[in-house]
Amino acid sequence: MATTLFDKIWDEHVIRAMPDGKTLLHIDRHILHDITSPQAFEGLEAKGRRVRNPELTAATEDHIVATTPGRDETTYAPGAEFIRAMRKSAEEHGIRLFGLGDMQQGIVHVIAPELGIALPGSTHTCGDSHTCTVGAIGALAIGVGTSDVEHVLATQTLKLHKPKRMRIEISGALGPGVTAKDAILHIIAAVGAAGGNGHAVEYAGAAVRALAIEARFTLCNMSIELGARIGMVAPDAATIEYLADRPFTPQGEAWDAALAHWRSLATDDHAIFDKEVAIDGGEIAPTVTWGTSPEDAIPVTGAVPDPATISDPGRRATKERALDYMGLTPGTPLEGLAIDMVFIGACTNSRISDLREAARIAEGGRVAGGVRAMVVPGSSTVKRQAEAEGLDRIFAAAGFEWHESGCSMCCALGDDLVAPGTRCISTSNRNFENRQGPGGRTHLASPAMAAAAALAGKIVDVRKA
């Protein structure tokens, strides 16, 4: 029987079907961060339990840390307690911690594949909704809540309902200036923020195959923004090349055995999906959001839509509220809209390829007067590589701030905030009300679009920059 990539990995990890209709799965890798882990460890301690497989667990400090140069655990005072709790728990349970000052520290979804902790065909969990990012290498990666973090720590298993299968096929080729970020924003606008609810999404098609692995991370990262907890791309030669010689990938005979398995991980011809979506890659343009949901996305050449055209009263009211919050009126062109801040970073777009693309736009230019622009690498490894290539000097010469690695402005848990009423173009994944700071107005876009906006002081079409 023809089966999907998702079914193959799921079936390999089933322990048993549960009476409540859920399935108990074995979890191959579990990675922790500083926000959702303290409560999980407190739960273990209250019940007198230990971490079942500490060798299958890793931890990092990324969410509630300062990213200013020279930072330490005390730089952002509200985060110090979380950082110390993480360090204490990791030491007590024998868990490898990539803490502040560690050469391999970074955003949880960046370092998991970067270090080879997550692998194709594996089940991978983390207490963060954007764990779906890691599905880009062909892993079944699931974001879980704090109670499930505790459950995985205690049992190395996870109980959940099996999602339906959804395939999004992007045919053809992406045009000049169009990136994976534009593609996923285009998809969310097309299917809606709830279009993937209850599904595991596989991205396929010629345009997806042509993407570099780091671009596939961007694509899968925002699967949760279309309502799906799981996003995947089948592993191929590019995946294998990316993973070769990572610090924690298998070596020697184990590597050869892993390759044999990874090469079998593809959706069979004639496999059945519960839902299929077809996208023409050639129709995707550089895309920017205008409202307070990722589905509020249009080509940069477009204008803010009029909610009055929406027949459903509840949906119309939601879009009217979005316009009010964003300080926009129907018909306003996105091109030329003045911005106050630029954020290049987050688990969506903070890898070396993202920084190279932004630096290419920034080189020789200057951040517009009155605009604050910052670049936050996704990991310490990315930061070192960027500095070795001189990207930090390009950004500094252009007037961008160069930061330490961490989640930063994406989730507004550190010192990096968008001030009330100010407008930020951001490479992150969410533009909800108050997401990047109380009253902050966020427009999502690609690194190239963000860099171009920084220089112009307004939203521009990167194809003209």
Image (cartoon, rainbow, N blue to C red):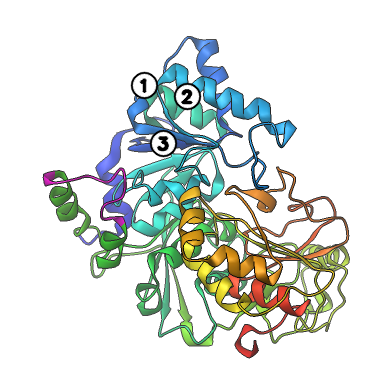
Residue 433 visible, this orientation: yes
Q: Is residue 212 above or below residue 228?
A: below
- Residue farthest toward the left in the current orientation of the protein: 253
Q: Is residue 139 above or below residue 275?
A: above
- Amino acid type shown at disc 2: Ala
Q: Is residue 231 above or below residue 380?
A: below
- Amino acid type shown at disc 3: His
**Residue 455: mark:** none
Q: Where is residue 205 shown, x and y percent of the image?
A: 36, 76
Mark 3 and mark 1: Cα distance apart in space:
11 Å
Which quadrant does the N terminus fall into?
bottom left
Q: On the image, numbered disc 1 is attached to which residue?
A: 52
In the image shown, does 184 or 167 lie closer to the viewer?
Answer: 184
Disc 1 element: loop
* Segment colored magenta: 243-253
Residue 39 visible, this orientation: no
Q: Where is residue 363 shown, x and y percent of the image?
A: 60, 77
Label 1 Cα crowd, 10 Å radius (few <14 / some 14-19 / many 20+): some
Mark 2 and mark 3: Cα distance apart in space:
13 Å
Q: On the image, numbered disc 3 is attached to which residue?
A: 30
Which one is closest to the eye, mark 2 or mark 1?
Answer: 2
Q: On the image, numbered disc 2 is attached to which residue?
A: 90
